[in-house]
């Protein structure tokens, strides 16, 4: 998948963690999001947006908590900027879908 930092930066455990998220995205999240977007299926889209809101928070907290771990040298500044924006986008989209469903739009 090639999107992870090296073990020299995030340790072997960090590599395993990032690969787990990347694989989950590849086999579950991306198809679910694509299906929801292409079919306008609000259930699938809401599930994918829930993941969009949740996973950046998990990754951000993991990166922050790993700061003091031996051999961890990842600069988490980009994570501190980008991941909250992704979570807020997912939550905003969920709120828009919820608003549409309350108005009876499908």
Image: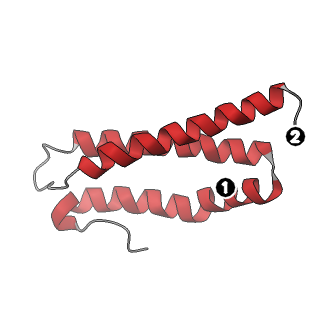
> Quarter of the image containing the N terminus?
bottom left
Residue 19, horizontal then vertical, whole percent: 40, 63
**Which tag, 1 or 2, sits closer to the chain's start?**
1
Q: Residue furthest top?
A: 102
* Residue name at image x 21 percent, y 44 percent: 66
Nearer to us in this view, 9 or 100: 100
Tag in front: 1 or 2: 2
> Quarter of the image containing the C terminus?
top right
The residue identified by callout 2 is 106
Nearer to us in this view, 99 or 53: 99
Task: Name the image quarter holding residue 30.
Answer: bottom right
On screen, residue 79 versus residue 104, left or right, reads left
Residue 12, horizontal then vertical, whole percent: 24, 62
Total numbered labels: 2
* Residue name at image x 67 percent, y 43 percent: 47
The residue identified by callout 1 is 33
* Residue name at image x 74 percent, y 48 percent: 44
Q: Residue furthest bottom?
A: 2
Under circle 2, the secondary element is: loop
On screen, residue 55 versus residue 34, left or right, reads left
Residue 45, horizontal then vertical, whole percent: 71, 47
Specify the color scheme: secondary structure
- Alpha-carbon neighbours of circle 2 within 10 Å: few (<14), some, or many (≥20)? few
Nearer to us in this view, 11 or 34: 34
On screen, residue 21 versus residue 25, left or right, reads left
Task: Name the image quarter holding residue 2.
Answer: bottom left
Under circle 1, the secondary element is: helix
Residue 16, horizontal then vertical, whole percent: 34, 60
* Residue name at image x 73 percent, y 55 percent: 37
């Amino acid at each position: 998948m090639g999107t992870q930092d090296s073990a020299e930066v995030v340790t072997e455990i960090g590599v395993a963690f990032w690969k787990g998220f990347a694989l989950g995205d590849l086999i579950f999240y991306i198809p679910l999001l694509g299906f929801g977007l292409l079919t306008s299926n609000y259930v699938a889209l809401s599930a994918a947006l829930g993941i969009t809101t949740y996973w950046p928070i998990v990754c951000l907290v993991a990166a922050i908590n790993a700061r003091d771990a031996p051999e961890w040298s990842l600069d988490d500044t980009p994570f501190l900027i980008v991941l909250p924006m992704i979570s807020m986008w997912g939550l905003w989209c969920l709120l828009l879908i919820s608003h549409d469903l309350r108005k009876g739009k499908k």
